[in-house]
Amino acid sequence: MTANDNNRLIGVREVMKRTSLSLTFIKRLRKADDFPRAVPLGDRRIGFVESEIGDWIAGRMAARAAA
């Protein structure tokens, strides 16, 4: 794994697949600042840093274990 692998961008469809969340719910979480920030890629395209999505998922799992 190289340093760039940690900064790989993934699209919203991949984020939806990895988190099992709908686009609407991801938008709601983003609006509440409870989701990793998107990286603007163009006028109508965004990406997410893959490692930040992984960290967010791990945080959710840790919260479940702590409850």
Image (cartoon, rainbow, N blue to C red):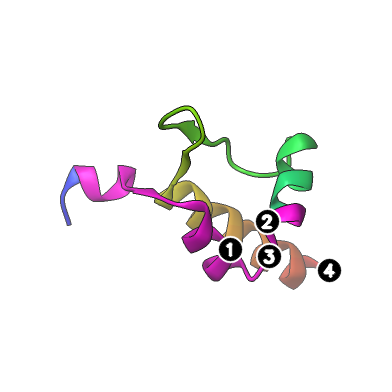
Q: Residue at left 49%, top 58%?
A: 54
Mark earlier in primary sequence (2, 4): 2
User: Marks 4 and 3, how far apart in space?
Assistant: 21 Å
Callout 2 touching callout 4 (CB < 8 Å):
no
Label 1 Cα neighbours within 10 Å, binned few <14 / some 14-19 / many ≥20: some
Residue tagged 2: 23
Residue bearing the label numbered 3: 21
Dot 1 and dot 2 residues touching (CB under 8 Å)? yes
Q: x%, y% of residue 25?
A: 76, 55
Front in this rendered view, residue 1 or 14: 14
Residue 16 appears left or right of 8: right
Comes first in the chain, label 4 or label 3: 3
Three-letter code for the amino acid on which mark 4 is drawn: Ala
Instruction: For the residues labelled 3 and 1, say whether their Cβ atoms are less than 8 Å apart.
Output: yes
Q: Residues within 10 Å of mark 3 (few under 14, many from 20)?
A: few
Q: Residues within 10 Å of mark 4 (few under 14, many from 20)?
A: few
Which numbered circle lies on residue 67?
A: 4
For the residues labelled 1 and 2, the Cα–Cα distance comes to 7 Å
Q: Which of marks 3 and 1 is nearer the N terminus?
A: 1
Depth order, front residue of 48/41: 41
